[in-house]
Image (spheres, coloured by chain):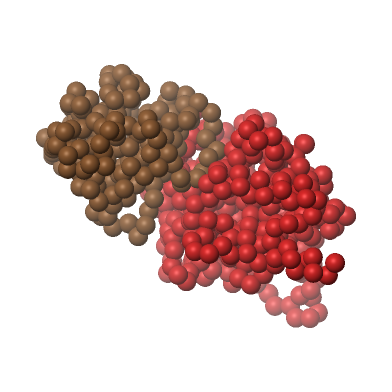
Chain colours: A red, B brown
Amino acid sequence: MAEKMELKKVEVWDGNLAAAHSLRQAQVDVVSAYPITPSTPIVETFAKFLADGYVDGEYMMVESEHAAMSGCIGASAAGGRVATATSAQGFALMVETLYQASGMRLPIVLHVVNRALASPLNVNGDHSDMYLGRDSGWIQLDTFSPQEVYDMGLMAFKIGEDHDVRLPVMVHQDGFISSHTAQNVSPLSDDEAYEFVGEFKPMNAMLDFEKPISYGVQTEEDWHFEHKARQHNDLMTKVFPKIDEVFQEFEKKTGRKYKIVEDFYMDDARVAIVALGTTVETAKLAARILRKEEKIKAGVVGIRVLRPFPFEQLGEVLKKVKAIGTLDRSSPNGTVGMLYNEISGVLMGHGVKSIVLNYVYGLGGRDITVEMIKNIFRELDQNRKARKRISPVQQFVNLRGPKLEYFDASLVNRGK
Amino acid sequence: MLEIRWHSRAGQGAVTGAKGLADVIATTGKYVQAFAFYGSAKRGAAMTAYNRVSDEVIINHEKFMKPDYVLVIDPALVYTDNITLNEKETTKYIITTHLSKDELIKSQPELEGKDVYVVDCIQISLDTIGRPIPNTPMLGALMKVSGMYELDFFQEKMKEVLSKFPQKIIDANMKAIEIAYNEVK
């Protein structure tokens, strides 16, 4: 029986420590890991918890991230609660196995501490790895602070392991900005947390010899499409109701309220920023200041669940806004940013015609300040007042050297 | 919002110091943040660490900071690091040095006219802890200069933060905090 840990009402934890405690409290059976900066302390701390008797489980050290996720797949298929953590190149090396995990419907929890992808080599935070995972069939939960890493870390098990869902879940946090920033975190007690997550209930466990089952089978044109379609259908129809249910249960227990799409000051917002990660909170601060000091009706939309994509929820929250800034922390490498595309699709799908701008920022950990976000809001407000797009579609924020901007407004006006 | 920037070398304990300070402050019901800039961190490389303290939940995640306090725990960084970066008129500097305040300002004219305090955290940590780990004495000096907490209260809280260490090390740290508290000028 695992030892219990006494926790204070308020701990000062960084995002990595918050994630490690969520794994410990969920009493994960197997962690198969190959550590990589900045996610290393998650699996390192979990291994220590295990060695000190705070978890009844197994820690597998393997030779690569590909092997780490393969170990997770094996353990999950065998019928255990399974989790691991990774970042950047480690995530990239896992990609093949990520698709295996979701295709086999294995509810593994993966903490992704977001970091830039080389080359050039860089250990700091951006969303390149998160974006790389978005077609992999996993549920992707995003967090904006260490408290949220802890909260989503517990809820991820409950969402993914549900027998209607049975899908793996990524919990994202910003490398260093969340993972290595210690802040106040209010944890549940070990008993409360375990009671909330619940005991792992295997489904189609490979080690259930009464009911033999195969994993990783081959299907060609006869059935492959149906399997993929079913997975997509479950992502589209089963996940959001479950997430809503888990969020509500969590709120009852902790008072902390989460939504699939988080919105701040959106009731009367005329301009809005759509973002991911810690930037959502910084943008909230910028909006608060601008509302007070410059009477700009600024709002912020934070995407809590990136996959499945909350198309309808975003349409609802953005329908009255006149100008929207989509903030992408990943190099689009030759096109507009992911959020620009997704949000444009959402607006078009809802018959909403708003001005949409795309800001690429923060690559490799480059700072995004309150002042820079205020400038984005100001520019959005000028576009709103002009009632047409007067700024280039895409700009780079806080870049050294000459200003980079693409898809210039003049190109749009040329046809008139 | 109270903001603090630490100038240190990797291995001198600025991150631990910033974290320890955050731990103590959080027990009084305030909200805290402690973080650092890591490059390809090597022992001895110049680095910075940061604290934010507020009565409200801290949602600011920018790295940019206009510090209320600048804590320099390695004496040479006064000359090689830009310790006055993004300062305010009211920024207070607490600097580890064996020099007097006048000698220090003479050797680094950038500090002329600024609110400077000096304390020899390196020597204090050598005398008490036996190693040049100037982070806890710097916290003692900060308590004195800022008036944040009474010495006794701070020491009690730091004992909890350090509780995983052997008693001998805890005692040495308490002594270091006390000497720096009394000696900072």
Q: Please name the residue shown 33% across and 42% down the image.
A: B84
User: Left or right of B170: which side holds A197?
Assistant: right
Asked if residue B16 lies left or right of residue A45, the reply is: left
Left or right relative to A308: residue A118: left
Q: Quadrant of the C terminus of chain A?
A: bottom right
Q: Position of residue A131 (x, y in %)?
A: 62, 62
Q: Is residue B72 left or right of residue A321?
A: left
Residue A95 can be seen, yes or no: yes
* Up-down relation of residue A368 to residue A9 (above or below): below
Of residues B178 and B78, the one nearer the viewer is B78
Residue at 76% x, 57% y is A389
Q: Nearer the viewer, residue A53 or A310?
A: A310
Residue at (42% x, 51% y) in the render:
A41
The residue at 24%/45% (across/down) is B78
Instruction: In the displayed orientation, state which residue is furthest to the right.
Output: A351
> Horizontal and vertical percent for residue B167?
21, 31
Residue A92 found in image quarter: bottom right
